[in-house]
Amino acid sequence: MVEFVTIFLVVITTTLLVVRVAYVISQSSKPTRNTSQKDLSTLVVLGSGGHTAEMINLLSVMQKDRFAPRYYIAAATDNMSLQKARVFEGILDDKGADGTQFMQIYRSREVGQSYITSVGTTLLALGHALWLMVKVRPHVILCNGPGTCIPICAIAFIFKVLGIRWSYIFYVESIARVKRLSLSGLLLYKLHMADQLFVQWPQLQKQYPRAHYVGRLM
């Protein structure tokens, strides 16, 4: 009898979880719902090299007073990206910049790190991402390619499934990606984690039909 009840509960729990995941994926594939909320706290994931430059260019044309406060996150070993974000925020003259914060997160895997040792660092990055998501609880997550965004987006997706927080994930693929998505973009696309995934080349949208082509954004 006890075994039957245990099996029954496991089946019910698994079924409800599958249904909830399917619901979240179905909602994520729909156009983003309009919201009358004035301020949308925004988590901006930065990456080394050209990722940060592209993100700054994108932020410069956004409604900065609406997407505020902004929380910038970069890898723990990437001080340059946060410095560029500080310079960008320093030249803004609007109220949306008042609550800006700059944070760092552990990398899932460093360049050249073995896959075996990366298991531990990935778990550490997920734990750190969990702590940051609980602390920030953003309405919007904006990312454009760095692997640093994967733990953040994974935790955000789990929060959606559990009904804790619905953070809209917007992924903008780098303009350098002409024929195929980056690994980060491919993971978010295949796992249906992004609410909206944008590409900047028409041939890329043809290869990934659920992506949105809106021309060159950067």
Image (cartoon, grey):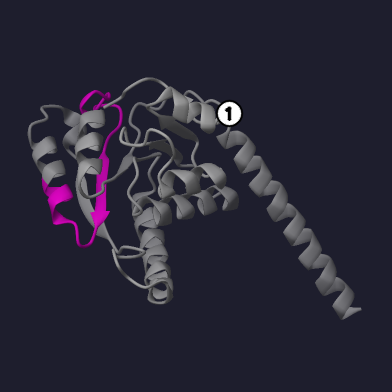
Name the quadrant containing residue 4.
Answer: bottom right
Residue 96, percent across and down? Answer: 21, 31
Q: Which residues are magenta?
A: 60-83
Residue 34, percent across and down? Answer: 48, 23
Q: Is residue 120 left or right of residue 19?
A: left
Q: Is residue 8 above or below residue 166?
A: below
Q: Is 78 contained in the magenta span?
A: yes
- Which quadrant does the N terminus fall into? bottom right
Dot 1 crowding, Cα within 10 Å, few <14, some 14–19, many 20+: few
Residue 16, percent across and down? Answer: 73, 53
Name the quadrant containing residue 201.
Answer: top left
Q: Kindly give the residue lying farthest to the bottom in the view shown.
A: 2
- Which quadrant does the C terminus fall into? top left
Q: Is residue 9 left or right of residue 20?
A: right
Q: Is residue 165 visible?
A: no
Residue 58, percent across and down? Answer: 26, 29
Q: Is 201 contained in the magenta span?
A: no
Which amino acid, by three-letter code, is at mark 1?
Lys
- Secondary structure under badge 1? loop
Q: Nearer the viewer, residue 198 or 162?
A: 198
Q: At x 22% / y 62%, what residue is drawn?
A: 76
Residue labelled with disc 1: 30
